[in-house]
Image: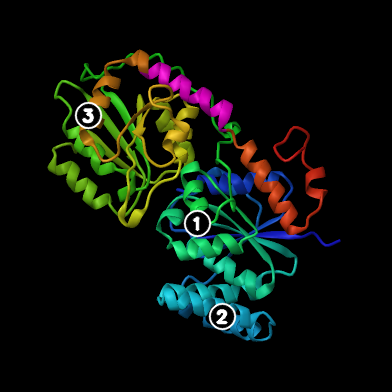
Amino acid sequence: MTERRIAVVLKGYPRLSETFIAQEILALERCGLPLEIWSLRRPTDRFHHPMHAQIRAPVSYLPEYLHTAPLRVLRGVLAALRRPRLPALLALFARDFRRDPTASRLRRFGQALVLARELPAAIGHIHVHFLHTPASVARYAAVLTGRGWSFSAHAKDIWTTPDWELTEKLHDARWGVTCTRDGQRRLDRLAPGRTLLAYHGLDLGRFPPAPDRNDRRDGTDPAAPLRLLCVGRLVAKKGHDDLIAALAGLPATLHWRLDLIGGGELRDALEADVRDRDLAGRVSFRGALAQPEVIAAMRAADLFVLPTKPGPGGDRDGLPNVLMEAASQALPILATAFGGTPEFIADEVHGVLVQPGEPAALIAALIRLAGDPDLRLRLGAAARARLVEDFSEERAVSLIAGRLRGSAGAGASALDSAPEGSPCAS
């Protein structure tokens, strides 16, 4: 019997900010699932994570803009004209386009025609990450080719996609997962029971043991400032502006340094804010970095800060993977009680949580944590214990692998080949 493969549709690949997707793909391959990656965009990051090099799945890129690949698009159109399901696709697209008459919608339709033509016959199922534009491409291609499709929903896609579109996609997909209860509640309000919960977790085997954190830095010695770290794309929902405002409000007697890791559209504005507040000598913008460098920064830091909050248009984070990465190194965490963060961090147990969008609350928490190294040590150890006990990747991988295996019609072969004790074996 020909092995049935699974097409994984992504908005862009590889991406430094999407370690959770690369980790999942790598784990599914280790379960024996044969995957192919189809990306709507080519990579723009200068670096890749080491795990990207470990992924064996072939990668194909759809034309991001249709006019750049007219022959591929024309071949997709001609192939679609010969398919019996074209009328169903045209009816679906017409309904969507009436409610969303945009160039982006036309582009997704064209990408779907290319995908439908170029998918190998061995592809038995389509799985897509993100319920917004990538899911439109996957859904259209699935309708045209008669394949089933499923989804992993994450953050922005859940909160910024219109209700009508989410509802229809949730009902059309065979199944789906999301990575926070916060997101699951939103999707269940639109289509009850259609979305399963699967926390990303971490593959702890990729991370070094936590370092010794008995350092007593408290910010009183200018020669040994408190080392703060924030990792996240420089976009509004990460709350960097609140962090900078809070740092500017700290007493002059508290000595600190901040490393900001991540790139994004707000870098120029944030750098200007830092200069205007006379903090340029204490805040370092390090740009986007590969995971080994991020982990090295976490091992050297005294406190991890991530003040996420609502972004424009309802955009918001799910459960940021960097929180779990910080916990892997027993790095104490100061974050906001927003999105999926409280599902991992209980306030005063695994970290300190403040309300989003409140720099004054960040100031108070920073002063308190700086002056109490014992509290930081306790919180960091508790966060690591929480990660190890409840947020390893095995549970999610087992759920998703089982669903994909059944959807692709792979039978038991991949399961039978999984190593004993692996998250794929049962």
Q: CA distance from mark 1 to mark 3?
A: 39 Å
What scheme was used to colour the molecule? rainbow
The foreground one among 263 and 240 is 240
Amino acid under label 2? Ala
Question: Where's residue 375, x and y in %?
Answer: 36, 16
Q: Is residue 199 above or below residue 148?
A: above
Which image quadrant for residue 38?
A: bottom right
Amino acid under label 1? Leu
The foreground one among 92 and 332 is 92
What residue would you read off at disc 2? 91
> Which residues fall within the magenta stretch?
376-391
What residue would you read off at disc 1? 190
Amino acid under label 3? Ile
Q: Is-magenta flag for residue 212?
A: no
First-in-chain label (1 vs 3) = 1
Say which quadrant the C terminus sits in.
top right
Which is closer to the viewer, label 1 or label 2? 1
Question: Where's residue 255, x and y in %?
Answer: 21, 23
Crowd band around label 3 with a 10 angstrom C-alpha radius: few (<14), some (14–19), many (20+) = some
Say which quadrant the N terminus sits in.
bottom right
Which is closer to the viewer, label 2 or label 3? 2
Q: Is-magenta flag for residue 378?
A: yes
Specify the label residue 362 is tagged with.
none
The kind of secondary structure element at disc 3 is helix
The kind of secondary structure element at disc 2 is helix
